[in-house]
Amino acid sequence: MAVSWRSWLANEGVKHLCLLIWLSMNVLLFWKTFLLYNQGPEYHYLHQMLGLGLCLSRASASVLNLNCSLILLPMCRILLAFLRGSQKVPSRRTRRLLDKSRTFHITCGVTICIFSGVHVAAHLVNALNFSVNYSEDFVELNAARYRNEDPRKLLFTTVPGLTGVCMVVVLFLMITASTYAIRVSNYDIFWYTHNLFFVFYMLLMLHVSGGLLKYQTNLDTHPPGCINLNRTSSQNISLPEYFSEHFHEPFPEEFSKPEEFTQNTFVKICMEEPRFQANFPQTWLWISGPLCLYCAERLYRYIRSNKPVTIISVISHPSDVMEIRMVKENFKARPGQYIILHCPSVSALENHPFTLTMCPTETKATFGVHLKIVGDWTERFRDLLLPPSSQDSEILPFIQSRNYPKDDWKPYKLRRLYFIWVCRDIQSFRWFADLLCMLHNKFWQENRPDYVNIQLYLSQTDGIQPLDNRLTVGAVVEENSCRWFEQKFPRGRKTVGVFCCGPNSLSKTLHKLSNQNNSYGTRFEYNKESFS
Amino acid sequence: MGQIEWAMWANEQALASGLILITGGIVATAGRFTQWYFGAYSIVAGVFVCLLEYPRGKRKKGSTMERWGQKYMTSVVKLFGPLTRNYYVRAVLHLLLSVPAGFLLATILGTACLAIASGIYLLVSVPPAHRGKRTQNQTQVAKCVCGVKCAVRSVCAFHVCKWSSVSRLIDLIPSSCQALIWAVALFSRGHPHDPWL
């Protein structure tokens, strides 16, 4: 089916625009730095020694600077949550863009991987060239101590070399543990190795302080390629005509006629020897801001998390679900947010996110989550709070609920809520049945019976005959979703928010459907919840 | 914590190391520098490691995400029976494969990465009951020149509360590293003015 441009722009437009801006910044930085080292007069002698490797390594380094600084910003979750919930970001489009923070983090991560590869390869070639092209004329420009010094010694005995090797190893550990398969199956490995980022950044700060690459400071008194009258080696012997014409001539505005040997294009006289100075480590300027911001955020999270939470009640539901109700001082949350639980008695190091199923209100401070017992942490947590159960664990249900305030009605812009829940078997509905019934009764009492429309789907039939048209058995979700989308929404251009929490295949189908054309011109804004 | 399947991570690492070896080998061989044959070896070793590690092993608990098209390689890998099934054999094999690539600058990082994967396979191959016993039998901790030990220590530091056998890992990995460095040093002595890659 054809794409609906309204929906596509709402779902993908801003995201793609930001991606384009980010890409342009990377390309610009890469190109600008490449040209600087390729053509800049201050790097003329260094470029002669190292060649293309110098330009590639420095250009990839500037891209790495940008991405190493940007990658930390999407992980400042408290700051992002504050921006998202505050009045300072009124546009829904911008708020939805903030939801893409994890995707942007991954994009920057992949870029860091690719350009680290380029950077490392180019620097390995540089190490070889430092060794082979050792310069007796410009001794301070050399990284090697003598001609044909073993480049592996340069790698392991210099600060940039050694820190570079360590950074590659740390990056290797982080990347291999960040693949989708590892995140889904062994999240612990991903989480612990990802915390090595701090080691990576510390090594990066040291890496750039080495000062191996130098630029020439006295370009006015020693234009690159000028003729040194005192030196006889590695210089062109100038022709007498040029010598007499250009003696003591100031720096020409245009290039002079090129010589036979391409090394020297200028025929000027050197006033003095070239002087070199190490580059200032720009990386410190790039990464110090975001790193400090992220460290401040982690510190704030740690301080905030030290305040204890009191568990008011623990309710055991069918299908291995446990509901926990808690109170905490000065805790505010809105529907749709999640909390991270940390229980030192269960595990000193593990934290786990759970979407709030009950939010604190102005009159009642209690908030709650529903946990599905699957995995060792939830099992131990349940054993701590409730007597041990012998029930087998099942796979997580597809959906997490959003529970709007029960006793404090605020006028949300939402006009109607369609709640679609897909489960494998009918037992899985039982643990949520009470909550759904309460919600249904509440809206009936407030004379809003059509506010919440509940649709339940069962993927396995097992001979069940539904008595109610709210339950569909043996449904193929994608097919029904398509028809359902078309039927449910009346004429007129409306905006429908689609919120999906489920497996990737379902999410991809719904995303595609949300972008497709429909007869009524309705715009579907697609949102997805994911923790891995 | 005890349910972490380290072998899955070792598999990802070995696959990535194979790719790094292939890349380094191509750079070394295309440049035709001295001892470029180590680069050619690195390509062959990298391809072999990639093929061996491409099929993702079945998880002990839960469903396994298969890599695209892995069933073709799975049938070949299964033919070798315990040689490919056993993690100890894989650990030793990867360590031996990584050593020759350490002589070239272009492939030295591939060596380091494959050695780390080998270390993790070695860790997985020892049953949990015997881990404490081996710690007592280790004589001394060898110093490791490269940053592998630092990285492994950083990873292990997060487990120190829950895992009593961490000191065994710290003992083993530096020993492998030290052996590797000694081997490289022993065989890399040559004319000081020979250009090295």
Image (tube, coloured by chain):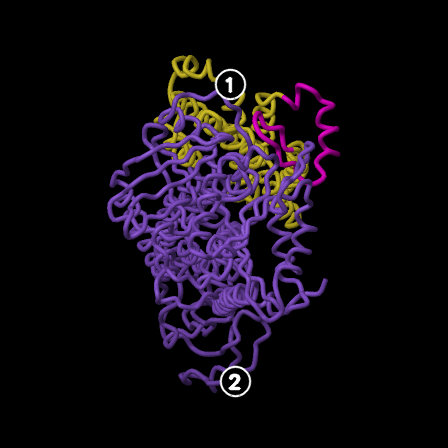
Reading the image, the residue beneath label 2 is A241
B84 within the magenta span: yes
* Quadrant that contains the N terminus of chain A: bottom right
Identify the element where label 2 is drawn. helix
Q: Amino acid at mark 2?
A: Glu
As drawn, the residue found furthest toward the bottom would be A245
Reading the image, the residue beneath label 1 is B126
The answer to whether B69 is drawn above or below residue A133 in the figure is above
Q: Note the chain letter of the purple one.
A: A
The answer to whether A166 is drawn above or below residue A95 in the figure is above
A403 within the magenta span: no
The answer to whether B117 is drawn above or below residue A222 in the figure is above
From where the camera sits, is residue A438 visible?
yes
Q: Nearer the viewer, residue B95 or A329?
A: A329
The location of residue B26, given as percent across then percent down, is: 65, 46
Quadrant of residue B60 within the rendered picture: top right
Q: Which contiguous range is marked in magenta? A: B56-85
Chain of the residue under the numbered disc 2 shown in the image: A
Camera-near label (1 vs 2) is 1
The location of residue A128, given as percent across then percent down, is: 52, 50
From where the camera sits, is residue A125 visible?
no
Q: Nearer the viewer, residue A188 or A145?
A: A188
